[in-house]
Image (cartoon, rainbow, N blue to C red):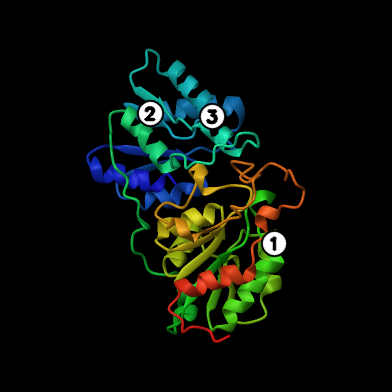
Amino acid sequence: MLLPVVRALRENYPELPLTVLSQPFARPFFEEIEGVTFQAAELRGRHHGIRGLWRLAGDLKRSTKFTHLADTHSVIRSWLLRFFLALRTFPRGYKSATLDKGRREKKALVRQEDKQLVPLEHSVKRYAEVLKDLGFPLSVPYQLGGLQARELAPQLAPFFATTRLRVGIAPFAKHRGKRYDLDLMLALVKKLHKRGIQIFLFGARGEEQFLLERWVTKPDLIVVPKLGLNLLEELVLMRHLDLMVAMDSANMHLASWAGTRVISVWGATHPYAGFYGWGQEETLAVGRDDLACRPCSVYGNKPCLRGDYACLDHSVDELYKRALALLPLPTEEA
């Protein structure tokens, strides 16, 4: 979700030297934005733990002559890093601002008594507020896309040799409260495939890839991890899809950045918390608004209060009809 903000910052302040600090996996996303330097935080190696953050502060001091510091994460780790940077650069010669996550409003959104079910400020706008506090006001257009045009990876050529509709399916999420039943998602895949649609299945290497491979009974069901793509190549693949079906997960945000419409499936969480795909139409979010207990979690990491995860009880036919409505297919006869 930070990508649209970084893009807008570059466009509004093209002469501003800009360095993004994040974990190594994020490098290709930010380096494809012209004029952005990326610095990796090796949190599982050199920069692990408190001593590692102290080393990271030293590395930043030596490599980056920054005048402004934007903490768009605002967690204990980033707080410690800012503290160590202040110690290492005393007297401090830079201006600092940190993200207001709106924790109080989010708590009111998910509590069961006197729930305040109202749309909260989107995280993208919260990131922009940090930059405004540093003296760089900017407007981030609410639109899909931002990824530069790139050619598909060579191994994808056989799958794009013919003109047909292509849909991505990303059935996984980190927490149980955000995961749709895999058997039901498989049923959706079969229904879409029956209409002649080519399906690309997204997941992580390892257990998720193993589960997806069990689904593959037809050559038009492509397990993306088997193709050996890097993250940027997967992003380019998303750009060439006609539609994506995903959970409230990273793939929803990546497809949004790629410029692809996403039918997002929601459970314990809610788009009102400010984590909806940037640029996506509100009507593309599928959620059980008839449950008084929902949302019960900001991130989906809390156990279900009912014990049955009814918030994820979405009809396969509902998802199927929504997908068909967004694809240029002839109306299916009953």
Q: Position of residue 176 (x, y in %)?
A: 69, 50
Residue tagged 2:
69
Q: Is residue 75 left or right of residue 92?
A: right
* Classed neighbour count for the residue bearing mark 3: other residues with Cα under 10 Å, few (<14), some (14–19), many (≥20): few
Upstream in sequence: badge 3 or badge 2: 2
Residue 220 in view: no
Separation (CA) of disc 3 from disc 1: 31 Å
Say which of marks 3 and 2 sits in front: 3
Q: Which residue is farthest left?
A: 15
From what the image shows, is residue 294 above or below residue 328?
A: above
Q: Is residue 111 above or below residue 202?
A: above
Residue 105 location, x and y as percent? 52, 32
The kind of residue on which mark 2 rests is: Leu
Element class at badge 3? helix
* Spatial separation of the CA atoms under disc 2 and disc 1: 42 Å
Q: Kindly report which numbered mark, 3 or 1, lies closer to the viewer in this rendering.
A: 3
Q: Bin the neighbour count of mark 2 within 10 Å (Cα to Cα): few under 14, some 14-19, many 20 and up.
A: some
Closer to the N terminus: mark 3 or mark 1?
Answer: 3
Where residue 7 sits: x, y (%)?
A: 33, 47
Q: Return the residue at label 1.
A: 181
Q: Which residue is mark 3?
A: 104
Classify the position of the C terminus by image quarter.
bottom right
Marks 3 and 2 sit apart, C-alpha to C-alpha, by 25 Å
Q: Is residue 87 visible?
A: yes
Q: Is residue 22 left or right of residue 334?
A: left
Q: Residue at x 48, y 50 (%)?
A: 276
